[in-house]
Image: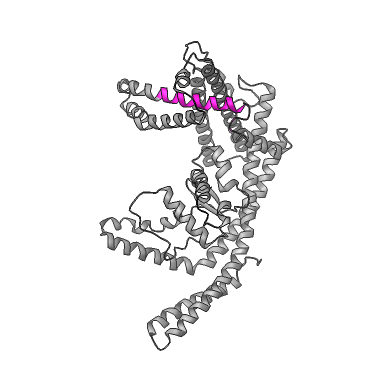
Amino acid sequence: MHTVPLRSVFCDMRTPEQFAYYLLMLGHIIQQRPDLKHVYMDFGCRIASTWQRYVAKHPELPPEAAGLEIMVNWMHGNGHGVACQLTNSGRYRKGAGRRIGEEIEQLWSGTKPVAGLVRYMTQARRRDFVEAVLRSLSRKKFKKMVKLLEMKYRDTVKLANEGVAEVAKVVDAAARAGVVDLPAAAAEYVQSVVPTSKDAAQPDEAAWQVEYVLLRLREMELRALQGKAPSLAVVSSASAVALAAASTEAQVAKLRAALTKMEMAREMSPLERGKWKPGYPLFDAAVQRLKEREVQRCQARVETLVLEIHQTHAERELAGATDKDAKRSQARARRKRAQIRSMLEEMYVWQGVGGDGQEVVVRLTEQQIKQLYVPGELAPWCTPSSGAAAMRRHHGRLFHEADAALTRSREEVGFLRYEKSRLGTWLRKAALCVEAARQKKLGVCAGSVFLLDGHLRAMEALQSELTNSRIPSV
């Protein structure tokens, strides 16, 4: 939490990041600290299952290794899909506290002022220089450790109080919209984004066929792009380059590997594989189910964005926003309207999927698109019941986010009180170790005694600050 770089925990790597490095590192850490509960990684959503397989193959690891929770950092998680965030982000993980998980990013930000110098150094001197910078940062962090802890506690208490007000605001807005049972609405929202099964509305066999057909369609479209990319140079060379990059053989090979894996799992013969193309009844039925699923997804996203625009306008009118705040609100609304048009275009594409040329693509007129933004008006595909369900999911999402933020802040307040106790224990034990080392150096090395005396004075100062801090004791 304190982002203090320690000795013997950094490694000078010559190769890019690999899963193996993280697995070996986690295996070493969990053996040293079996009480470790949470780990944040940028790609925690991907490595979590790999870690479980690694644990199963290494019985020498402690039993606690299987219970290690690997989560996605808060900031990096914002770039992941909503389903991934709800499942893997520490923001929504019970018991995770308000640990952002970006400590390494914060640590490297402290090296920015001198980062430009290392490119002109030899490898050996660069390594020495980086070690010196980390040592300097460590000393500065160590001296301010109690102040940083106290500041973190004060900010977290403030966030918790703001969270209470935000939850009350969400509850009040939902009540005005006729949504009373917000926990149930939040559960409905989560279920709509992260179903309990891969396709809860369909049998397993049908769900498998839909995913198989999706891979087939992607492979066919990627191969078709290779022939279309050169013609786009007439319209836009940038589009041609982007399209050509999307149709590389590497991506086609990756899709082919996924198809082969699925075919082997289903024990499909070569003859059966060859049947899966337009005109085959199972293929056409799966395409239809896929179209319905994706069109409904696009429509649900459009409904959500429309409700968010309505909320933005209502909040601006209620608060009487200043010119600066009004411009920000208008910018958010413009971005959401652009997202709506993008989702509508994606919906039109899915409506046209099929291959027989008879698909009906229902495009909204410009007037219908503008009508979406009128409060109380339903989208053309909506019924009163579906509109009410969209309203419940909208307020359920707001409640789920506000409640998660409040819960994480309250958890963090408790963690920080425990951190105070733990820091006090560490300072006392560390002071005893430094004092023992000082006694050994008395009369042997005056320089070492001088340095150790400085460490003792720093620890005594920290102990005094911790005793007088405003953080309540456990």
In the image, 47 versus 247, the foreground residue is 47
Spot occupied by residue 60 in the image (x, y as percentages of width and height): 51, 57
Residue 137 drawn above or below residue 455 = above
Q: Quadrant of residue 314?
A: top right
- What residue lies at 48% left-to-right and 60% top-to-bottom? 3
* Residue 455 seen: yes
Question: Which residues, given as a range, are shown in magenta?
Answer: 198-221
- The residue under the point 51% across, 19% down is 283
Is 434 colored magenta in this rendering?
A: no
- Count of all numbered marks drawn on residues in the image: 0
Residue 76 falls left or right of residue 412: left
Name the residue rendered at 43%, 62% in the picture.
9
Where residue 213 appears, as percent x and y from the top left, is 50, 23
- State the colouring used for the structure image: one colour
Which of the 4 image quadrants contains residue 175?
A: top right
- Tell me the quarter of the image containing the C terminus: bottom right
Q: Residue furthest top?
A: 358
The answer to whether one can see residue 103 in this image is no
Give percent across and percent down for residue 381: 61, 20
Residue 354, above or below 46:
above
Residue lying at the far bottom of the rendered structure: 443
Residue 107 picture location, percent across and down: 44, 58
Any magenta on residue 218?
yes
Nearer to us in this view, 4 or 387: 4
The image shows residue 57, relative to residue 136, as above or below, that is: above
- The main secondary structure of the magenta stretch is helix
